Image (spheres, rainbow, N blue to C red):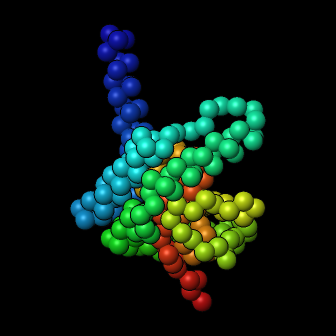
Amino acid sequence: MRALKIPVLALQLTVLVSGAAARLSPQTNAGNEKDTQVIKDFQDLVKKYLDFRKNEVGSSPRPTNSPDKIADTQQQLATKLQDKRKYANQGDIFKPEIADYFRRQIAATLDTKHGKKIRASLKHAEPVHSLALHVNQVYPQGIPLQSTPPTLLLNLPSLPKELEYRIVGQNLVLYDSVPDVVVDFIPDAIPPEKN
């Protein structure tokens, strides 16, 4: 009899956890089939990029205690990636309909009761304003990598562990931490503050 109760309890826990995750997922907040398809298209493009990078360029540097070895390996990966993706352009992953979806999600999040806190967090987290962005560029040394506030991240599609969303000025950057490069970006993704 106990054996029957444990799977039922496990199933109930799975349903509860899945339900909580679904409430936080942008896929369920998309509101319509078109947005759901846009999210799927974005995730497919992200997977395609990562598969390409891993197959053509390599993956994470081997674990070492030497910062110099890590930096050298990272630089080698970045150089290979830049060569293999030399024809990559802004918008290859953030296609227009995907960029529009992200802009809507960001604007909607900033219009919530948390909007002022998110903007304050962005202003206090060493904002980067004067960096000209280019796809495949190595993120410049000495310029802080501004993180994306968690409240905003909850409303954006999740990313594989190697990729991150970063904010540069008003732009949303898709950043690959393994070779330290800008994969793609959305210009003017952060709308101006309303007065």
Quadrant assignment, res 118 = bottom right
- Tally the marks: 0
Farthest residue to the front: give it.
83
Say which of 53 and 112 sits in front: 53
Eyeballing the image, is 98 above or below 9? below
Residue 173 in view: yes
Q: Is residue 43 left or right of residue 183?
A: left
- Measured as percent of width and height from the top left, residue 110 is found at 53, 73
Q: Is residue 115 left or right of residue 89?
A: right
Say which of 61 and 76 sits in front: 76
Q: In which quarter of the image is the N terminus?
A: top left
- Measured as percent of width and height from the top left, residue 96 is found at 35, 72
Q: Quadrant of the C terminus?
A: bottom right
Farthest residue to the left: give it.
33
Could you tell me which residue is drawn at 57 percent across and 62 percent down? 137
Quadrant assignment, res 105 = bottom left
- Measured as percent of width and height from the top left, residue 125 is found at 71, 65
Could you tell me which residue is drawn at 63 percent across and 42 percent down? 73
Could you tell me which residue is drawn at 50 percent across and 65 percent down? 135
- Measured as percent of width and height from the top left, residue 148 is found at 59, 61
Could you tell me which residue is drawn at 44 percent across and 57 percent down? 85
Eyeballing the image, is 105 above or below 70? below
Eyeballing the image, is 27 above or below 60? below
Residue 94 in view: no
